[in-house]
Image: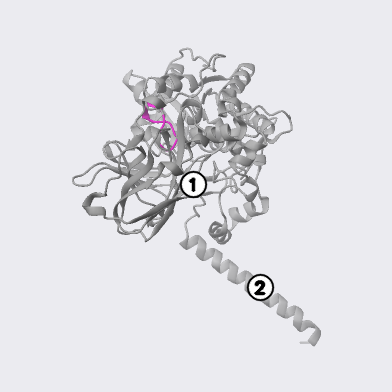
Amino acid sequence: MPPRRRPAATAVLALASVLVAFAACELAARLLLDPPRYHDAPLELDAELGFRGVPGWREELRDAAGSYEFALNAQGLRGRELPGSRRALPAAALRVVFLGDSFLVGQALRAEELVSSRVEAALRTDGREALVFNLSAIDWGTGQELLALRSLGAAVEPDAVVLFLYPANDLVNNSPLLAQRTDVSAGDPIRPYVRADGGELRVEYASPWRAWLRRHSRVFAALERGSLALGADPGAGESFVERLRRGRAPREDLEIFRRPADPQDRWSRAWQTTFALLRAVRSECDAMGARLLVVVVPSVHQVVATPKAMRLDALARRVRGAGLDALLDWDLPERELARFFAAEGIESVALLELLRAASARGERTYTRDEHLSARGHEIAAQRVERWLRGGPVEALAPRASAGGPVSLLPEASLAPPLLDFRDDPRAESIGDGWLRWTPPREPVPGAWLIGPNALAVLPAADGDLVVRGRLPQEARLPVDGQVAIVGGPRLRFRIERHGAFDIRLPSAALQRGSWPLSDGYVAIILAPGETHRIGATPAGLFVEELGFDAAAPRSPPGGGGAALSPAAGD
């Protein structure tokens, strides 16, 4: 071979070798690797929908009644499997399709507690043959639900479609302008964003070239899964205080409760995108000959005053001199949607007022993971069932005199200043970071296992701030942690032995006069850091009591099984 041709031939051979090697790796990946799970939830990559439930998933979970199985069917859906064709279904059966996200998947609930199961059971009890299909996946947006209706609903040819709309997440999930600006949805980097232009649907991705490679190469998808950090990008890392100082909501996702002043604002455009998607869902239902009902599910923060919201309220009072209620309009999404549905002639029901009323009666309408509880699903099922029977469905938009989120806590002056978890989990007083409550079992009292950081709210009271509990044997030593009063001081503590501990942070160091209060309550963050892991979950320590105690110090059981250093002001 002439010398001038050798470099070219070498390059061609090298490129061919690389392509052959890549093809071999790709073939091996497709044979040996399942579609990658980009999400911590039981979801896997899907070429059309972005991601969907893992087919055949089985997991044992627990609730207050004991263990139960969370299961997904052969299509990765919860509930009845889709038929191969419409002809496989009984001709006389009422066919109902539910569309939604994690609220309809309902990981924290048993299958029979879901709204879809309740509706089918109620109709059958009254002698109506009904087949209900739950086409839902965790973290889907309205666009993905529309794609699922087109691709999966064809086998059902539904008589009725019930779309669960969760504005607090769905506006973020529907708009690429909000992609990765919040931490409410881990699927933003890989989800398809759907634009409804007239009768055409156009799909776009946050990164089109990555999306193409992801759909066509199992090797790329596996490598990307290993390197991609799901969640908010660095630009979304502005602190609560910085946002409040600029007159913004303390978190980006809470901007949904503020009316955008600029029609070109990303939230204004997210609303318009969502309205267009809802029209497209209505058009799809019309083409199928199906009735459409949209059920508007509120955020837990609209319904009850959670510890998380009380923490942000305290910060707002410190930074702005006024609480969250002066900054956020908790009823805004429902009012906007009520006007839209009335103008478009779309049947709808908003659950906000129903859930507030139930919560005011002491009923638990949300689970600890901020999804609807069994009672919440029951309330929704009653409305859907009435609609399916042909009865009237009130829009139930918030009234002008709506009262806002319901407080589940007693008046601060009447509440016990010390939370005792030894016999009661006291779930209404705790927020993020409380992993699992263990009931009392002689001789060990009940306690909460907390993570590296745990939020609680306490009635402001006199006395030392105390934390009592136990440090498990598997925890590393020493534990150098801190207790932070939101908007106030941070106080350090040290635990030097396993076993029982009694941390006492002296009253003189608490600077009570500077605390920003939320309805007489103070927000506390207990931060022992990660002391050990339970599986993949970072864990801290067990907490038996937390609060203010004016009594004299007492030694831990067993003669002081943990040694503590004195607390110091930060």
Q: Main secondary structure of the magenta part?
A: loop
- Which stretch appears magenta? 366-376
Q: Position of residue 429 (x, y in %)?
A: 39, 34
Q: Amino acid at mark 2?
A: Ala
Q: Callout 1: few (<14), some (14-19), or many (20+) C-alpha neighbours within 10 Å? A: some
Q: Which residue is mark 1?
A: 490
Q: Position of residue 298 (x, y in %)?
A: 51, 27
First reached walking from the N terminus: tag 2 or tag 1: 2
Which circle marks residue 173 in the picture? none
Tell me: 188 left or right of 12: left
Q: Quadrant of residue 246?
A: top right
The residue lying furthest to the top in this view is: 392
Q: Position of residue 289 (x, y in %)?
A: 55, 23
Q: Which residue is mark 2?
A: 16
On screen, residue 562 above or below 151: below
On screen, residue 263 above or below 400: below
* Residue 367 in magenta stretch: yes
Disc 1, SS: strand
Q: CA distance from mark 2 to mark 1?
A: 62 Å
Q: Position of residue 251 (x, y in %)?
A: 59, 38
Residue at 54% in and 14% down: 401
Q: Amino acid at mark 1?
A: Arg
- Between 66 and 319, the one nearer to me in the picture: 319
On screen, residue 341 above or below 374: above
Residue at 56% in and 54% down: 229
